[in-house]
Each structure stands twice: as structure tokens, then as C-alpha cells.
């Protein structure tokens, strides 16, 4: 019975982790203009107001274009890196992989300002394209981490068997390897989509006059009257993220089970 | 090797080249650009490309920059400490007390909040910690306090609490992974040989989990030093950090070279601080082992740590009188980096993967 206090601590810790997410819908459906307790009663008018905000539509459009492009680009680049890291040994492998994974730990402000300064030095204006490039850099390590999990479970003899049966190396990759990592690829696409949709700093520095959803949201935080709408928007975003996460996680576990691995849990 | 790469190495390098080239173009080149920029100056809109260390002199001398940098490091240090100390029991609970088939679910539960809107989460901490927020409300209701706590919002404490929340999964996951790798029979062996539960934990589990703790420290400390949103939303004026100043330099003052300098400055400070901390822990552990551990070892290691930290503290306090205003941070950096390099050269990698 020594584990009792630990279980209690775990429960409290989960409460701490989930506190903001539990409060969010409370305020989104709260019939009051101030984000504070006590709650004033139930309303859905903030969601209706949300639908009637034209700026928001533009920001949502930008965010979706960026997030979709980033998901595809980062996953494609991640496929190369993950395949190289799991299948081959090559000189400086540790250094090269470490460098590619660096954006995972580098403060985002540093990445953002170095990209901003470089782009303006090259005479390029900031736009959704520059955000796509920045987000791809940021998402690539996450894509690689997920895809490495899928690739590392593969039996190399499958590929050898395909080549013995007359496939070329490329043919074997597309006919045998790729189908086996499809769940990992979809999980990577979803995670990169979520990260890009939610990323603020790089978008803030590089957005110019084309705001993404978080940049729009940041602008609204300054106006107290707009806060309930922000809460409504946040609720939708959080619900969407959780939905996508559950799908991504289910796919990842399905992929792992199919290649006979244990699920260690988590995407990182 | 000589002439050559094996065909496997060639294929591997070809395979890794698209992401590598992308990272070189979008990460390495921009980082080199801001280093270059930090040696230039800007007069209104024109960039003056004459090489100068003026920005660095200003960054080292101006008390505002120094305060912000030291505060960023201090806040990141507290965040790291809080995050790792809170994360360890959770990782331990999941690894040792949760049934194997439920572990993946627990890890998933812990990572979910991390993937949901960063801005909104931090904004809600402002609501939670507010004067009339649920924390103060509950404490008053319970009779713990009479008036709302003044120290939990719009200052450095609020930044620490909020960041400790934001980075929780980053600390839990690496610690969990290293705990999962521990061979459970080692723990049984320790118990069979007469150790009690506490000593087994201290002498077997904790040392084996240290690589995960170290990874957690790195992955929490580095990004938090450069956090922008949290200090802006919950920090007030007493919680402003270096990233906020970088933003002000670039967008409000149109001084990109100074912004670049502060970014390089922050990166250098993070690198030196971490190198100092990690390598000095190696040194202290080595001293402890040298005298055979136990109380004597702890005493010796503690004394060495006190001397190391004391010297830095003295310089920070009195450095301006001794070395001039620009000298203090420079001398500290030299001592920290010098000590770290000396330890790296003369002491072999010891326990804990340090």
C-alpha cells in the first residue's frame, strides 16, 4: 500500500495538467463578458459571433493552407531522414541527425529571428510561404521521431526478399516498405498539421500582413470585449486537436501492432 | 576508409541529403546570418556593414540587458527544477505502478494538453492565477488566506508556474523512457542483498534514471530561456525575459543587429551555463567517488560545489568594481567555460551518462 500517496499525486498532477483545458469550455459557454468566476449561465452566442467574424475566416484559411503544406513537406523530408537513420550507417551520422533534430530544442525565438533577418536580407517579403518554410523546419524533427518508430520495427529481410524476387531497390521500397509505414506517415501528417496550426512565434515573426489563427488570436487578446469569442475559438481548436490526436495515436498503435512492436506510448 | 565510402554509406548520405540541405539552408545559414548581423549596426533603416563589437559591449554593459539575461536564466533554472521534480514521481508511478497495458494510455493522457493551443493555455493560466481566479478563490474559501495572494500573477513566479505546466511532458517522457529501461531484476537483487526500499531507490533506480533526468533538464532548460509568450501574458514587468527584448529591438526599435546580438548572447549564455552545470556535476560526483562516497564524499562534493558557486556569486556581486561594467559577465563566462573545458579534458565521463 506504499503506492497510495503516489497515486494521489498522479491524480493531482493530471488535474494541474488539465486545469486550463477544463476551464476553457466553461468560459466559452459562459453568458458573461468577463473571463472570471462566478459563471453567469449558459449561452452559445460567442460561437455565433465567431461565425460572423470575417477576419477570422481569412486567418483560418491561411492557417489551413500553411498547416496542410507543412504536414506534407515535413513528412516527406522526415521520410528521407528517418529511412536513412534506421536503414543505413554513414559517416557523421550522429552529427547530421543531431543537427536536423536541433529545432526540437532550440528556442523558437532564435529560429524566428534568424529566419526573419535572413529573408529580409535576401529581399524577400514575409508571407504564408515563409511561414510554411519555418514551420516545416520546426515540424521535421517530430515527423522524423514518429517515422523512425515505424521504420525501426521493420524486418529488413522483407526488403531483401522483394529484391531477391526481382524488384529493384526503389521498387522494393514502394512495394513493400512504404505500405508498412503508412500508419506512421498518417500519424506524422496529423501531428505536423497540429503543430503548425498551433505554432505562434514563427508565424508571429514571419506573418507580415497575412495572420494565422494564433496570430489573429494574439491580436484579440488585447481587447477584453473579444475574450469570450477567443475562448469559443480556443474550445474549437482544442476539440479539433484532441480529435486529431486520438486518430493519430490510434493509427500509430495500429501500425506498431501490425509490425509486431510493443507500444511504448507517446509521440516523442 | 581512404578512397572511400562504401555503397551503403553513399546510399545513406544520398537518402539523408534532402532534409540535411533543407536544414542547412533554413537553420545553419540563418544562424550564421544573425551571428554576422550581430557585428553590424543599424542607423534607422540602413545597415552599416562595418565590423564592430559595439553591440556586444552594449549588451555586456547595459544593466537592463544583463538583468533580463540573468532573469531568463534564473527563471529557466527554476522552471527546470520544478518541472523535473514534479515529473519524476509521475514517470515513476507510470513506469512502476501502472499496469503494463495501461501505460500507453497514461502517457497519451499526459501528452494531450501539450498539443492543444499554446496561447490559450497560457492565457488561461492568467485567469487561473488572477486576483479573483479559482486558486485565490479556493484558498480563501478554505480559510487558508484572507486576501488574494499578490505574488502569483504578473511576476516571475507566474512565469515559472505557467512554464512548468507547458513543459511537463517534455520532462516526463525522457524520465519515463529511462525508468522503463531499468532491468527489474536489479531491484530484486538489491533487496535480496539486504537494502531497504529507500536505499534501493537511491542507489539503483535513481542513478539508472539519471540519463533521462539529464535529457529532461536539457529539453526543458534550453527552450524556456527563450520563451516569449509566457512572460508577455503572465509576467508583468517583473517577469519580462530576454526574448521580449529581442522582439522590442527588432520590431519596435528597428535595431536588427542589436536583436541579433541579444539572440547570440542568449544562445552563448545557455550553452555556457549548461556546460558549466553538467561538467561541474561530473566533477563533484568524481570527488565524492574519490573518497569512497558516504558522508565524507557528500561533504567534499558539497564543499566543492559551494566554492564553485561562491566564486561566481562573488564576481556577480562585486565584478563591476573589479573588472569594469563590461567585465563581470565576461569574466564569469571565462571561468565557467574554462572550468567546464578543463573538466571535459581531464575527467573521463563518469556515472549517470554525465
Image (spheres, helix red, strand yellow):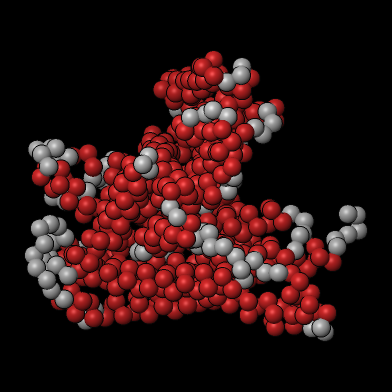
Work out whether residue A57 or residue B211 is closer to the camera in this orientation and state it: B211
Residue B188 picture quarter: top right
Quadrant placement of the N terminus of chain A? top left
| Image point (45%, 55%), residue name | B99
Q: Residue furthest top?
A: B296
Work out whether residue B210 or residue A194 is closer to the camera in this orientation and state it: B210
| Image point (91%, 58%), residue name | B3
B152 over B296 or under it: above or below: below
In the rendered structure, the answer to whether residue B106 lies left or right of residue B186 reads left
Work out whether residue A112 or residue B298 is closer to the camera in this orientation and state it: B298
Residue B34 appears in the figure: yes
Residue A242 position, x and y percent, is: 37, 69
| Image point (8%, 65%), residue name | A40
Q: Residue furthest front?
A: B192
In the rendered structure, the answer to whether residue A32 lies left or right of residue A268 reads left
Callout count? 0
Residue B120 position, x and y percent, is: 30, 61
| Image point (54%, 41%), residue name | B209
Q: Residue furthest right?
A: B3
Work out whether residue B296 or residue A119 is closer to the camera in this orientation and state it: B296
Residue A150 position, x and y percent, is: 60, 68
Residue B52 appears in the figure: no
Residue B254 picture quarter: bottom left
Residue A196 position, x and y percent, is: 45, 68
Amino acid at each position: 500500500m506504499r503506492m497510495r500517496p503516489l497515486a494521489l499525486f498522479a491524480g493531482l498532477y493530471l488535474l494541474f495538467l488539465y486545469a486550463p483545458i477544463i476551464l476553457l469550455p466553461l468560459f466559452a459557454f459562459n453568458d458573461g463578458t468577463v473571463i472570471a468566476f462566478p459563471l453567469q449561465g449558459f449561452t452559445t452566442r460567442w460561437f455565433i459571433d465567431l461565425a460572423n467574424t470575417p477576419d477570422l475566416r481569412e486567418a483560418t484559411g491561411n492557417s489551413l493552407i500553411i498547416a496542410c503544406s507543412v504536414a506534407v513537406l515535413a513528412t516527406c523530408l522526415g521520410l528521407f531522414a528517418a529511412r536513412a537513420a534506421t536503414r543505413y550507417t554513414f559517416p557523421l551520422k550522429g552529427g547530421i541527425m543531431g543537427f536536423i533534430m536541433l529545432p526540437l530544442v532550440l528556442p523558437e525565438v532564435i529560429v524566428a529571428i534568424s529566419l526573419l533577418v535572413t529573408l529580409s536580407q535576401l529581399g524577400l517579403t514575409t508571407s504564408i510561404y515563409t511561414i510554411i518554410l519555418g514551420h516545416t523546419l520546426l515540424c521535421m524533427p517530430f515527423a522524423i521521431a514518429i517515422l523512425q518508430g515505424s521504420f525501426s520495427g521493420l524486418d529488413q529481410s522483407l526488403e531483401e526478399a522483394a529484391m531477391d524476387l526481382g524488384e529493384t531497390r526503389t521498387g522494393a521500397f514502394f512495394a513493400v516498405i512504404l505500405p508498412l509505414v503508412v500508419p506512421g506517415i498518417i500519424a506524422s501528417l496529423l501531428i505536423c498539421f497540429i503543430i503548425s496550426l498551433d505554432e505562434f512565434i514563427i508565424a508571429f515573426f514571419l506573418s507580415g500582413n497575412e495572420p494565422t489563427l494564433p496570430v489573429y488570436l494574439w491580436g484579440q487578446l488585447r481587447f477584453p470585449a473579444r475574450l469570450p469569442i477567443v475562448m469559443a475559438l480556443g474550445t474549437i481548436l482544442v476539440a479539433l486537436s484532441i480529435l486529431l490526436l486520438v486518430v493519430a495515436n490510434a493509427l500509430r498503435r495500429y501500425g506498431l501492432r501490425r509490425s509486431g512492436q510493443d507500444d511504448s506510448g507517446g509521440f516523442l | 576508409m581512404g578512397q572511400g565510402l562504401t555503397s551503403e554509406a553513399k546510399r545513406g548520405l544520398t537518402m539523408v541529403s534532402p532534409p540535411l540541405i533543407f536544414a542547412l539552408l533554413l537553420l545553419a545559414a540563418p544562424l550564421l546570418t544573425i551571428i554576422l548581423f550581430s557585428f553590424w549596426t543599424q542607423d534607422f533603416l540602413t545597415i552599416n556593414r562595418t565590423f564592430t563589437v559595439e553591440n556586444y559591449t552594449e549588451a555586456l554593459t547595459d544593466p537592463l540587458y544583463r538583468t533580463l539575461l540573468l532573469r531568463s536564466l534564473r527563471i529557466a533554472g527554476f522552471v527546470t527544477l520544478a518541472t523535473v521534480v514534479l515529473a519524476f514521481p509521475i514517470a515513476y508511478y507510470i513506469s512502476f505502478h501502472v499496469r503494463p497495458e495501461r501505460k500507453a494510455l497514461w502517457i497519451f493522457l499526459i501528452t494531450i494538453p501539450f498539443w492543444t493551443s499554446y496561447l490559450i493555455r497560457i492565457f488561461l493560466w492568467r485567469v487561473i492565477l488572477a486576483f479573483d481566479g479559482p486558486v485565490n478563490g479556493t484558498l480563501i474559501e478554505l480559510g487558508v488566506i484572507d486576501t488574494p495572494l499578490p505574488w502569483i500573477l504578473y511576476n516571475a513566479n507566474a512565469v515559472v508556474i505557467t512554464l512548468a505546466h507547458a513543459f511537463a511532458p517534455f520532462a516526463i517522457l525522457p524520465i519515463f523512457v529511462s525508468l522503463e529501461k531499468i532491468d527489474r531484476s536489479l531491484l530484486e537483487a538489491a533487496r535480496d542483498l539486504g537494502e531497504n526500499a529507500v536505499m534501493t531507490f537511491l542507489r539503483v533506480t535513481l542513478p539508472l534514471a539519471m540519463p533521462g533526468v539529464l535529457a529532461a533538464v536539457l529539453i526543458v532548460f534550453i527552450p524556456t530561456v527563450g520563451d516569449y509568450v509566457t512572460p508577455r501574458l503572465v509576467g508583468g514587468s517583473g517577469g519580462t525575459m530576454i526574448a521580449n527584448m529581442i522582439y522590442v529591438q527588432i520590431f519596435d526599435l528597428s535595431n536588427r543587429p542589436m536583436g541579433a546580438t541579444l539572440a547570440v548572447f542568449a544562445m552563448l549564455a545557455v550553452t555556457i551555463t549548461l556546460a558549466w552545470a553538467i561538467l561541474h556535476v561530473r566533477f563533484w560526483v568524481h570527488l565524492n567517488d574519490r573518497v569512497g562516497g558516504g558522508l565524507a564524499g557528500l561533504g567534499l562534493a558539497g564543499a566543492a560545489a559551494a566554492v564553485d558557486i561562491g566564486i561566481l556569486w562573488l564576481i556577480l556581486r562585486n565584478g563591476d568594481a573589479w573588472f569594469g561594467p563590461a567585465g563581470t559577465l565576461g569574466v564569469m563566462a571565462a571561468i565557467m567555460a574554462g572550468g567546464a573545458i578543463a573538466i571535459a579534458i581531464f575527467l573521463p565521463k563518469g556515472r549517470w551518462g554525465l
